[in-house]
């Protein structure tokens, strides 16, 4: 198994995570651990999960991301999933993996706007 | 000509003066429009009808005794041994679509049916091949596929009507294939135009059934996953009635009766406002 490493980067008051193209289960679990540890340490107001490189999304990944998002909420932050590819979105929908109510954004830039905006889904342009 | 006249008056017994059952069957083969020829299990041509002469351009006299491989283009020479192998096992080859070459070197599409021929003791001694020229059929089929694709393409436009707003007008009924194409098109355009809002307009949809509604919901969910917001517009009374009667849950979806009302929602999401020059909305 290839060892995929994930880095959780803090930018100002936001955590940034970029997922590799084909995240395996170990990586996904590691992601949750890392994110929660960083949430505790830096107390950021949000997490941006950049999945623009991800080509396949399985149920484990979807579930863990939804879970992580809920945990982040419990710790006082908001999660935005950014950059999902059209093909991934179609597959995810067909498999019924709709990521709960997690916020989504077209790009990381938009995601940052969303997090800095108190009224979600507004002034997105 | 004399033969034909005799055939026409033939009785049910299958025999009439001067024409045996054998000769009768031979005449059927001879006058067939399909190319029919016999060959040995080694692939040597034994008989060759008029249809074959017309189709391949070889006269019977020049081709009987020669191997069938001369009818096969170089690109598919391995087909012959495969077919002969099947025949030796007593199997037939049914409507096998492939390419053959005429005497003048021109290649054409054929459908081949090759069956083993047995002698009285049941031993396989050769094979009969019936070949039909399907060039025209194939061309029509391709034409049809191309047209269908064309209809698919023209029927799923996605238009950018404002910075950050795209409109996808649905026209006609949505089968699974069109819905799939529509979804892909829409998502692609959302990414390209960096759109925040997608208006799915169903004004041009005559009726919505459960499956169409399901496709719409899937599309809306995918749009949301991508990070944009979908608004269903053009919900006419009849459509609203059907949706309610079918018990389709669109609670999470913003819907409007007209495209213009949808555009208002979009502008609202973008935090924009249209006002007249003198300052009044």
Image: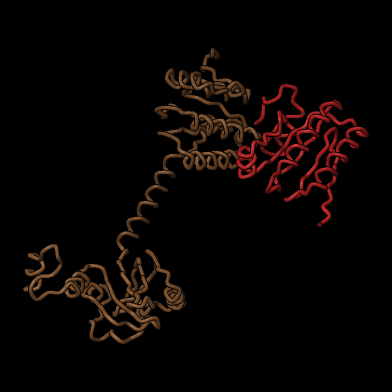
Q: Quadrant of residue A118?
A: top right
The shade of chain B is brown
Q: Residue B209, image x and y in percent?
A: 46, 28
Q: Quadrant of residue B16?
A: bottom left
How far across and down, in percent of the image, does residue B77 sit? 44, 78
Q: Quadrant of the N terminus of chain A?
A: bottom right
Left or right of A72, for residue A91: left
Going 55% across and 42% down the picture, which residue do you hit? B184
Looking at this view, is B140 or B97 the one in front? B97
Please, which residue is most extreme toward the front here? B121
**Residue positioned most to the top:** B280
Query: In the depicted view, which residue is nearer to us: B126 or B119?
Result: B119
* B175 is higher (above) or lower (below) than B269: below
In the visual, does B169 lie left or right of B132? right
Outermost residue on the right side: it is: A41
Residue at 66 percent across and 37 percent down: it is A106
- Residues B53 and A77: in front is B53
From where the camera sits, is residue A32 visible? yes
Toward which corner of the image does residue B105 lie, by quadrant? bottom left
At horizontal 49% and vertical 34% (from top left) the residue drawn is: B168
Q: Is residue B76 visible?
A: no
Above-or-below relation of B147 to B12: above
Task: Give percent across and percent down for residue B43.
Answer: 38, 81
Q: What quarter of the picture does the C terminus of chain A occupy?
A: top right
Apparent colour of chain A: red
Could you say where residue B204 lies in the image, as x and y percent from the top left?
A: 41, 29
């Amino acid at each position: 198994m290839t060892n995929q490493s994930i880095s959780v980067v803090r930018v100002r008051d936001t955590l940034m995570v970029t997922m590799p193209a084909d995240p395996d289960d170990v990586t996904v679990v590691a992601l949750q651990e890392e994110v929660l540890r960083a949430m505790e340490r830096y107390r950021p107001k949000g997490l941006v999960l950049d999945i623009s490189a991800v080509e396949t999304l399985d149920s484990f990944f979807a579930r863990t991301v939804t879970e992580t998002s809920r945990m982040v909420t419990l710790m006082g932050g908001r999660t935005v999933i950014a950059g999902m590819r059209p093909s991934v979105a179609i597959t995810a929908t067909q498999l019924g993996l709709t990521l709960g109510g997690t916020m989504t954004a077209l790009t990381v830039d938009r995601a940052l706007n969303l997090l800095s905006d108190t009224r979600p889904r507004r002034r997105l342009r | 000509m004399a033969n034909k006249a005799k055939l026409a008056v033939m009785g049910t017994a299958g025999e009439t003066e001067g024409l045996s059952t054998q000769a009768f069957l031979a005449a059927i083969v001879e006058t067939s429009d399909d190319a029919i020829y016999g060959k040995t299990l080694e692939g040597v041509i034994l008989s060759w009808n008029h249809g074959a002469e017309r189709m391949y351009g070889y006269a019977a006299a020049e081709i009987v005794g020669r191997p069938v491989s001369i009818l096969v283009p170089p690109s598919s020479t391995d087909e012959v041994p495969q077919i002969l192998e099947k025949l030796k096992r007593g199997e037939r080859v049914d409507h096998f679509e492939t390419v053959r070459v005429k005497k003048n070197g021109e290649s054409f599409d054929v459908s081949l049916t090759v069956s083993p021929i047995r002698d009285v003791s049941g031993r396989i001694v050769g094979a009969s091949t019936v070949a039909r020229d399907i060039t025209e059929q194939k061309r029509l089929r391709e034409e049809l596929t191309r047209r269908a694709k064309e209809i698919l393409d023209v029927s799923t436009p996605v238009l950018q009507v404002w910075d950050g707003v795209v409109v996808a007008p649905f026209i006609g009924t949505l089968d699974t294939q069109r819905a799939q194409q529509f979804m892909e098109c829409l998502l692609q355009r959302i990414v390209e135009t960096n759109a925040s809002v997608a208006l799915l307009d169903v004004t041009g949809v005559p009726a919505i059934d459960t499956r169409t509604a399901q496709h719409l919901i899937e599309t809306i969910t995918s749009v949301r996953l991508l990070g944009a917001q979908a608004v269903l517009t053009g919900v006419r009374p009849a459509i609203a009635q059907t949706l309610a009667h079918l018990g389709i849950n669109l609670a999470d979806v913003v819907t409007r009766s007209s495209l213009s009302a949808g555009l208002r929602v979009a502008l609202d999401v973008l935090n924009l406002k249209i006002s007249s020059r003198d300052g009044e909305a």
